[in-house]
Image (cartoon, grey):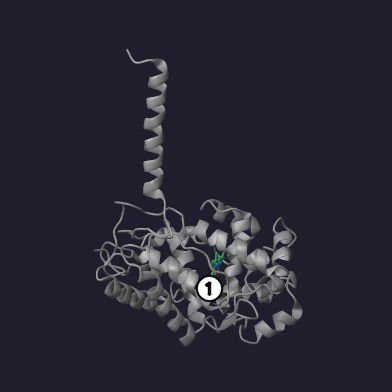
Amino acid sequence: MVSPTIFCLSAFLVLLVLATSASSSKALSPYYYNRVCPKALPTIKRVVEAAVYKERRMGASLLRLHFHDCFVNGCDASILLDSTSTIDSEKNALPNINSLKGFEVIDQVKLEVDKICGRPVVSCADIVAVAARDSVVALGGPTWAVQLGRKDSTTASRDKANNDLPSPFMDLPALINNFKRQGLNERDLVALSGGHTLGSAQCFTFRNRIHNETNIDPKFVKQRKSTCPRIGGDSNLAPLDPTPARFDVAYFNSLVKKRGLLRSDQALFNGGSTDGLVKAYSSNPKAFWADFAKSMVKMGNINILTGKQGQVRLNCRKVN
Ligand code: HEM
């Protein structure tokens, strides 16, 4: 007869083992490639730096690529899959088509990483996550330890990309709700929107804001209207903040001055619950950096595939 104490103790141990094995199969680690391919991360950094120095905007594009990957079925490189008879590519979804860029840089990284590692051990999802971090660093922003060990998906969903990515026409409650569905809170929303310290947007994404909205600085309206008329010029570009190739707090300063380019940008400073945080970041780069890094790690953990789930693609654009 087993004594109740021993029974309880062994039941507890079984539960503990189950709990840790379940969590470890899900857990990522910054050291994932240290043993199998110690040169992987320096190689990604080298290729990304070269691409960003050639064209500074590429850093913005690579950051956005990671965001658009993570918000659609998790950070699983589904965004990289081209259309086939069975794949309805996310590249053709409205927020991505004629807009999302950086795919060739990811191809180049994959080629060089697989070569240096001697075999395809680094997943495309991890490459995208590291490329986003290295881009931010190359443009003067904070660094963080990227959690690694994601696997790549075998599917993609254009419909999900259309439904789950936030739109630039959203107001604050819609943005908060959109991020909440990804497990991200208001602080993550504000910090991650700070990604708009980099890069540019096309006229059709901010036309209504500059021509019809009133919570906007008139001088700024005049500047923007010069390249984004009421009709035509849909793809003309304007910077998302005054210093689009520098990772700074100019984005938040612009919001405080009612110079947010997108409706969804200005929504973060429009008399609502996030005003305080925007104001705080606008004068405290260290706080923005720390929170941005923290939220990037959190975003990078959305719905990841690990262990035996998914695969490590040989070509980031195709399922093996
Ligand atoms: C909060 C909701 C968000 C909305 C509604 C939104 C929307 C947009 C839109 C409409 C553009 C311009 C696309 C074009 O005109 O082709 C853009 C660009 C960009 N977004 Fe966002 N975005 C959001 C959040 C984020 C987040 C979380 C990040 C990264 C952490 C990010 C990073 C970027 C970057 C870097 C660009 C510039 C890309 C380039 O110049 O190639 N965005 N975003």
Residue 159, x across and y down, in percent? 41, 59
Where does the image place residue 269, in percent across and percent down from the top left? 71, 64
- Please indicate whether residue 284 sits to the left or right of residue 231 in the image: right
Is residue 123 at least partly visible in the picture? yes
Residue 243 place in picture, x, y as percent: 63, 81
The count of marks equals 1
Quarter of the view holding residue 70: bottom left
- Residue drawn 56% across the image and 53% down it: 184
- Residue at 46% x, 54% y: name it: 302
Image height of 51 relative to 266, above or below: below
* Residue 218 screen position, x and y as percent: 75, 79
**Looking at the figure, which quarter contains the C terminus?**
bottom left
> Horizontal placement of 133 versus 25: left or right?
right
- Side (left or right) of 35 relative to 301: left
**Residue type indicated by callout 1:** Val
Residue bearing mark 1: 136
Q: In this view, does 24 lie to the left or right of 242?
A: left
Question: Which image quarter is the N terminus in?
Answer: top left
Q: Is mark 1 on a helix, strand or loop?
A: helix
Q: Quadrant of ligand 1?
A: bottom right
Pick whichever, 128 or 10, lies toward us.
Answer: 10
Q: Nearer the viewer, residue 155 or 93?
A: 155
